[in-house]
Amino acid sequence: MRWPLIAAAVGTALVLGGCGKNIPPESNSRSVFAMDTYMTVTVNDGRIGDALNGAETELKRLDGLWSVTTEGSDMYRLDNAGGAPTEVSPETAELIAFGQEMYDLTDGALDITLYPVVREWGFTTGEYKIPDQAAIDGLLKNTGADRITVSGNTVTLPQGMSADLGSLGKGAAGDAVTAILKKNGVTSALLDLGGNVQVIGAKPDGSPWRIGLRDPWSEGSLGRLELTDCAVVTSGGYERFFVGEDGVTYWHILDPETGCPARSGIASATAVGKEGRLCDGLSTSLFVLGEEGAEELWRSMDSFDMILVTDDRRLIITEGIADSFTLGESYEGVIKTEVLRR
Ligand code: AMP
Ligand code: MG
């Protein structure tokens, strides 16, 4: 995988010129391409240069471990081990074990071993196709994250199975970068990891960060959250999809029960909490689970808040963040807001 380093393009952070490096030393923002997306880290205080270098190195390192298409990466070696135990780095073993926890927690709605089915639809390459039901059924026989064994840093995936961490990786990377920034004295930062937003502290003027919630039906923003110290992760069918010859839209989040795009009545699901990897896993899961399943999961845990936008244009928001959300003016009367209380 290539690693183009692009000049930061966030706000007024970019200061051009300087000493011939890609990023001028005055800049407090850095963008890298990792995990198939552009990621931008903006820091406002602390040892800015060290923090940004550390963040960039870490994002590249984790992408190098988790990319399923990079020969020699942890996930590539695991997926091609033919059932043999595979030694991986501690971060990989830990994230796979976390994927298993999420599988249990969500009754199988999040399944990192769904990868062969995701690949069959062409979502990994962009060569989309609608697979035969027989092919999907065959592939589904070799799924189930509970069948992975993790023992220390040794992971065993039964022969015929493969896994990918696409549903968790950006969130986990956000947690890792957040830790590096904090070690470098950063108390105010914004991470935009391809739509996964993670913030440290507040804006430099002390006011909360404003995080836009994307309108699933257009490029615009449906409203905004004003928050500090948290991860905000959204999953939606609009992120990666194709329209089949049958005129139907097929997206990249699959229901592990059917092996087909999850059609649960949810247009986008956002999870808000302290931990990026949990929010990442949850946003994908909530999208699969649908309104009822998502509410049940939220009631059974106290570690996250959520916003569900439904196909019938309702916005369901949990009480912990209801006061932090402002619906865009043009959506008033168009989108009906409902607050979930415990
Ligand atoms: P996210 O963007 O975090 O919602 O994750 C979506 C990605 O995870 C997809 O592009 C697939 O690679 C993979 N995926 C799709 N459906 C599932 C699922 N039900 N469980 C786990 N991973 C999935
Ligand atoms: Mg996710």
Image (cartoon, rainbow, N blue to C red):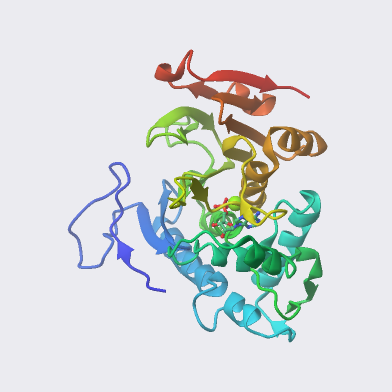
Is residue 164 at least partly visible in the picture? no
- Rendering quadrant holding ligand 1: bottom right
291 versus 112 height, above or below: above
- Between 340 and 12, the residue placed more toward the observer is 340
- Between 220 and 38, the residue placed more toward the observer is 220
* Residue 315 placement: quadrant: top right
| Quarter of the figure with the C terminus | top right
Residue shown at 51% from the left, 49% from the top = 250
* Residue 30 placement: quadrant: bottom left
Residue shown at 36% from the left, 57% from the top = 31
Residue shown at 82% from the left, 38% from the top = 300
* Left or right: residue 200 compared with residue 247: right
Residue shown at 79% from the left, 33% from the top = 299
Q: Position of residue 122 (x, y in %)?
A: 49, 64
Q: Position of residue 204 (x, y in %)?
A: 43, 37
Q: Position of residue 44 (x, y in %)?
A: 41, 46
Task: Give the farthest residue toward the left.
Answer: 17
221 versus 122 height, above or below: above
- Between 264 and 277, the residue placed more toward the observer is 264
199 versus 166 height, above or below: above
Tally of marks: 0
Task: Give the farthest residue toward the top.
Answer: 333
- Between 218 and 328, the residue placed more toward the observer is 218
Q: Position of residue 302 (x, y in %)?
A: 77, 37
Is residue 180 at least partly visible in the picture? yes
* Left or right: residue 127 compared with residue 161: left
| Quarter of the figure with the N terminus | bottom left
